[in-house]
Image: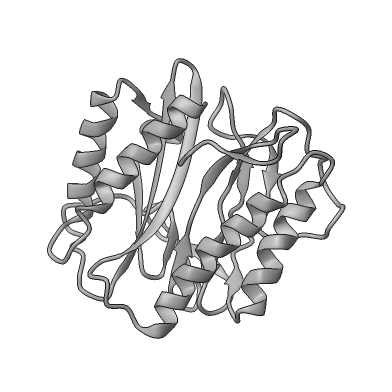
Amino acid sequence: MRRSGRIVREVLDEVSTLVKPGATTMDLEHAAERKIKELGAKPAFKGYYDYPCVLCTSINEEIVHGIPSEKRTLKAGDIVSIDCGVVLDGYYGDAAITVPVDGSLTPELSKLLEVTRKALYRGIEATRIGNAVGDVGAAVQEFVEANGFSVVREFVGHGIGTKLHEEPQVPNFGTRGHGARLRDGMVLAIEPMVNSGKPGTRVLDDKWTAVTADGSYSAHFEHCVAVTKDGPLILTQ
């Protein structure tokens, strides 16, 4: 899983360099598909429940599962969340980043990205033997809400291993001490999805793209994290 995680990170690193005004989300898709093949892995998302692409590319008010398209052109001031998964020798890796298109964001959007990224690491810090899934979710939720944003509730993190999605589910909210207990050797995909407005969501007519119900912006960061006796081990960096 460390190997599959490293491949995901290499793909995201390369694709993020292409995020600039005038690029389409399909440009990012083609680059990711080439890189995954070059590194000897297979895409985890393409064909999963008939999903058509190797990446999910979600712009501005889109939360997750945005489908790459030749028609979606990135513009200055946009943010784009890029989610990638691969499988290598039967083991999965999955990670996401949110990237500003031109680097010149409003103060609120800059804060949204920073808070979401830091919330991920608050969740990771709680990923310890003997803690519960609720400790992870609570760590994320408390930090996000203290900074004036909201966490998405309809979409959550998950266990990962020889399948892309395994038990337990890992919500970005919760009550400390509640839920499945974390054991040595478990791997969790922790992925805060944070809205600048209210937490409500809806899914577009394409049956995939989830957006904020109020049209506010949303950011998404994700790592795969192993639970070990030495503490949390991030596999996708």
73 left or right of 174? left
Q: Residue furthest top?
A: 89
Q: Residue at x 76, y 48 (%)?
A: 133
State whether residue 31 is above or below residue 172: above
141 to the left or right of 85: right
Residue, far left: 22
Query: In the rendered view, does 166 fall on the left or right side of 31?
Result: right
Residue lying farthest right? Answer: 177
Residue 11 percent across, percent down from the top left:
31, 39
- Give percent across and percent down for residue 2: 50, 28
Q: Is 52 left, or right, of 31 in this rendering?
A: right
Return the x and y of residue 157 as percentages of the image width and height: 60, 47
Residue 50: which quarter of the image?
A: top left
Q: Quadrant of residue 227?
A: top right
| Residue found at x 31% / y 46% | 13
Q: What is the x, y in percent for residue 141?
A: 68, 66
Q: Specify whether residue 45 is in view.
A: no
Q: Residue at x 81, y 41 (%)?
A: 180
Query: How many numbered marks appear?
Result: 0
Q: Quadrant of the C terminus?
A: top left
Question: Is 201 located above or below residue 12 in the figure?
Answer: below
Above/below status of 113 relative to 222: below
Residue sitting at the far front: 230
In front of the other: 131 or 160: 131
Q: From the viewer's perspective, is residue 231 above or below residue 19?
A: above
Using the rendered image of the protein, determine whether residue 106 is visible from the camera's viewpoint.
yes
Q: Give the colouring mode of the picture.
A: one colour
